[in-house]
Structures are given as structure tokens and as C-alpha cells.
């Protein structure tokens, strides 16, 4: 079984890589939401050309990474959310911090 070298990175940089560098589909979803705040999964899928299931996977991951704000919030009990479509908005402050962390890793910023 191959062994992969794992660089020693700070938790902040690892998180930034997960948010911003995961793959093209995740970045497409994130970019669409940043340009269209309050988007539904179906709108994101249509706007990116991705399957609804793929979009759901990425918005779930990005929400868990705290770079998307769902409305209604995940903390709202399911019974109170039932029948309401969730809209997603990018957290620009969190994204900016992640870009800054990656810039530091690449030696582009201090």
C-alpha cells in the first residue's frame, strides 16, 4: 500500500485547504453562492450544472466548515424547519480568513 507524505500544516491552513481547495465542484458551489446569496440547492445545481445530490454534499460540507449560513439555521429543530427550503449565503468574513491563511502558506501574504 502506498504511503503518502503528509506535510505539517497548522489547523487553520488545513481547514482553508478543505474549504477552498477541495475540488472544482466545491469551488463552483461556493462561487455560485457567493455571487447569489440566499440560493436554494436547486438554484445552485441549475447555475453550476451540477447534480442536486452533488450540490447537497458540498453545501453540507461547507456548512459544517462554517463558511455558509443556512436559513433556516441547522440549529432550528427539524419540526420547525419542515416544509421550508433552506437558502444558503456565503460567510465572506470566514472565506477571507481562509484565503489569508492560504496566502501565508504560499508566502504571498504575512
Image (cartoon, rainbow, N blue to C red):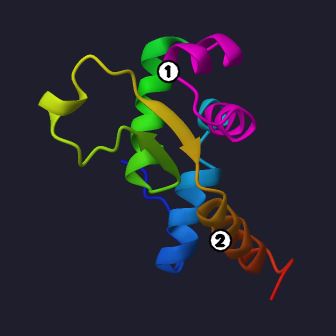
Asked if 48 appears above or below 108 in the picture, the reply is: above
| Depth order, front residue of 7/79 | 79
Residue at point 47%, 76% (across, down): 11
Instruction: Work out how far the residue at label 2 is from the one at label 1, CA to CA, in angstroms.
Output: 25 Å
Label count reads 2
Of the image marks 2 and 1, the number of the one nearer the N terminus: 1
Tell me where the magenta segment starts and ends, as one range: 27-50
Find residue 99 and report its horizontal and vertical position in percent.
72, 65
Residue at point 42%, 16% (across, down): 53
User: Which element is circle 2 on?
Assistant: helix
Res. 74 image quadrant:
top left
Quadrant showing the C terminus: bottom right
Tell me if 30 is positioned left or right of 65 in this view: right
Instruction: Identify residue for label 1.
Output: 41
Q: Is residue 92 magenta?
A: no
Tell me if 21 is positioned left or right of 12 in this view: right
Asked if 51 appears above or below 7 in the picture, the reply is: above
Magenta highlight: main SS: helix
| Depth order, front residue of 2/78 | 78
Callout 2 touching callout 1 (CB < 8 Å): no
Residue 34 seen from this side: yes
Residue at point 65%, 71% (across, down): 97
Residue found at the very far front of the displayed protein: 80
Tell me if 104 is positioned left or right of 61 in this view: right
Residue at point 24%, 29% (across, down): 81
Find residue 86 and report its horizontal and vertical position in percent.
41, 28
Residue 5 seen from this side: no
Q: Which mark is residue 92?
A: none
Q: Does the magenta stretch include residue 34?
A: yes
| Depth order, front residue of 69/14 | 69
User: Which element is circle 1 on?
Assistant: helix
Instruction: Identify residue for label 2.
Output: 97
Amino acid at each position: 500500500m502506498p504511503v503518502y507524505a503528509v506535510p505539517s500544516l497548522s489547523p487553520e491552513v488545513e481547514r482553508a485547504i478543505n474549504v477552498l481547495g477541495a475540488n472544482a465542484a466545491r469551488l463552483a458551489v461556493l462561487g455560485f453562492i457567493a455571487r447569489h446569496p440566499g440560493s436554494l440547492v436547486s438554484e445552485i445545481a441549475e447555475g453550476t450544472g451540477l447534480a442536486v445530490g452533488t450540490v447537497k454534499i458540498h453545501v453540507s460540507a461547507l456548512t459544517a466548515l462554517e463558511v455558509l449560513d443556512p436559513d433556516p439555521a441547522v440549529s432550528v429543530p427539524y419540526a420547525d424547519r419542515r416544509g421550508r427550503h433552506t437558502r444558503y449565503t456565503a460567510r465572506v468574513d470566514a472565506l477571507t480568513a481562509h484565503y489569508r491563511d492560504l496566502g501565508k502558506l504560499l508566502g504571498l501574504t504575512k
